[in-house]
Amino acid sequence: MRLRLNPFALAVVSVCALSACGGGDDNGPQEALNRLPAGVGSTSVKHYDGASDDLLTAGLGASGLQSDTAPAIANALQPTAAELRRMAIYLSYRGIVDTTTGGGYGSLYGPSVSATGAVTSGSGKVPGAEYIALRDDGSGRQNVTLMAQVPDSFDPKNPCIVTATSSGSRGVYGAISTGEWGLKRGCAVAYTDKGTGGAPHDLMNDTVPLVDGTRTSAAAAGNQAQFNAGLSAAERAAFNAATPDRYAFKHAHSGQNPEKDWGHHTLDAVRLALYAINDRFGEVDKEGRRLASFGPRNTLVIASSVSNGGGAAIAAAELDTEGLIDGVAVSEPAIEVPSDARVNVRRGNRLVPTVGRNLIDFTTYANLFQACASLAPSVAAAPFGAAFAASFDAKAAPIASGRCAALHDEGLLQSSTTATQAEEALQLLMNYGWEPESLELSPSHAAFEIAPAVATTFANALARARVSDNLCGFSYAATVATGGVTQLAPAALASMAAVGNGVPPSAGVNLVNNRAAQGPARDFFSLTQTGKFDWNLDGALCLRELVTGGDAWAARLQTGMAETQRNGNLRGKPTLIVHGRSDALLPVNHTSRPYYALNQRVEGQASQLSYIEVTNAQHFDGFIGLPAVLPGYDTRFVPLHLYLNRALDAVYDKLKTGKALPPSQVVRTTPRSGTPGKADPITAAQVPAIAARPAAADAINMLNANTVFIPD
């Protein structure tokens, strides 16, 4: 249990480390003034009344977030900052959470469910203040967005902060559904886009996004651009002449390898949140200046988020030498395990053959085989299985079967028919670390082009490639129905800060193969030089070669990859990781399972990490909420978001009362019954609590110093 100190007794020299000290007189100690963290420029502050607008739902309320009708934009060509904020919150929340009533929204989780789990009739709107700023290294090129939300319910006598670093490559509201837990508790929430974001640099017209999502010319924005690709006028002109109508995205093209700093950015967000609560609630000195009354010694801080944001929380805990973070609760984290981790995973009686690979490694592997594997007869009944075969294996353009045949021609598959090649590809994925439960998601993931999108973005980022490098022949542009490059509709660009996810295909921008035989074309529509459709196997092989090869670009990527690897030392912080066993994007064998083993090896008896693996749960709760598009997700999967909330509850109780964290375990859930696309409503019995004392058959433990055991 952490010692709680009087927040108003600390505005003395002991907290000067938080900010520059000043004031005081000749007869007493200097007092710590509340100052913005280093590198943070001017900060925008706005208070939301909780009626017309609010911190959590942007004024939409629980019903507005649930509605399939997106909030309106009055002038599509010139959306206001407020309209973009509302749209970003709406789409970010729905992108992470299943907002269907049958899936548990409004009964198990959601804005109208209280912090204690009580179902209310309220809208869930949260009044409070929102602070937004850019954090830069002085170059004007980093410009990471930081945000702190301080609810009016914040209790200065019980100060707390929760981090909600953006998931994926989204903007700063990308983990608003994690922030919800903190806002309901009266905690401030610390957000950051971690150097990513949905809005691009339009290279043809030289316009860029600002921190509020609105757009202006690069010249007018100057060093206040949320992202500028950094090309000189001559370079941009040459690029546009060779490849017109292209876009640069921050995650891919910042040249910063932002992932290496995601932990630092999360800590920066905590510092901004401390500044914000001091700005509102800190004591005032005799000259009317706010003091740094709240700091690490008296403010409870839980690092949290999902996916890449969860990985950022883990990284922040490892990097935290100031004691800013007290505990960690994350869901489905993207954790880059070091190449020398020397850990093993055994599930039941099977030693998993390939574990602990980095995201760029296993994603470029998936990018090779997943489209072909999606045609396997064994996954034909999986979500989108039949639709995938119909969409990508039509007689006119047999794209997926073309990938199977091309893999065979390259010697990467040995079977002779499409069906047997697809089954072989599926088996290769399992051998490379995917769990059997996750392989049935291959068709839906392939149909959404998830692997090529993620592989291309991370390859560019890790290699610090510029947009003008056209790494492996890829670029980003709008395309016509037949695949050719075209101009993006101006209205789509104007709202992309809110609508885009930062990893094309997204919001009208697609992945383009510049080397296609027919000329630059949308990646999966592109032809080989021999006139065949194979989903651009050459591009996929090029991306894979960056991971396994030895040329200059491969060396750059491998250097960047090493910079993102974590060390497993959580500094004894109470930590809960929850992960869905069926996760096909971030397989448990490459992320949470080996990280748990690494942490046990590194911290030993000092470790306070528990790993909770949830059956019948996967990466995209939002997909469960698309029964008309992806029928079968609803009858197969339960909401992992619920278990993140429970993990946060457990870590909070540990820090506040000393209640023991639940041990590592498998939580066995029950999917909803009914017809795919029309599943029966979920019940509490189908999503059991994390057990304080799990049955022996559910316990996760270490078999030896290097091997974690996961029950079947």
Image (tube, rainbow, N blue to C red):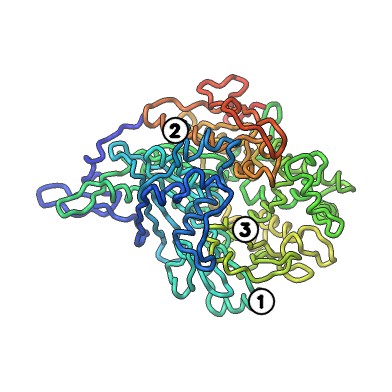
Query: Regarding mark 1 in the picture, which secondary structure is present there?
Result: helix
Query: Regarding mark 2 in the picture, which secondary structure is present there?
Result: helix
Q: Nearest the camera: 361 or 303?
A: 303
Q: Nearest the camera: 587 or 185?
A: 185
Q: Earlier in the sequence, mark 1 or mark 2?
A: 1
Residue neighbourhood size for the residue with mark 3, other residues' Cα within 10 Å, grouped as few (<14), some (14–19), many (≥20): some
Horizontal and vertical percent position of residue 16: 26, 49
Amino acid at dot 1: Ala
Q: Locate the N terminus by quadrant.
A: top left
The answer for how far apart the CA atoms under marks 3 and 1 are is: 23 Å
Residue neighbourhood size for the residue with mark 1, other residues' Cα within 10 Å, grouped as few (<14), some (14–19), many (≥20): few
The answer for how far apart the CA atoms under marks 2 and 3 are is: 35 Å
Q: Which residue is mark 1?
A: 242
Q: Which residue is mark 3?
A: 506
Q: Locate the C terminus by quadrant.
A: top right
Confirm whether residue 268 shows in the render: no
Q: Which residue is mark 2?
A: 651
Horizontal and vertical percent position of residue 587: 64, 41
Amino acid at dot 3: Ser
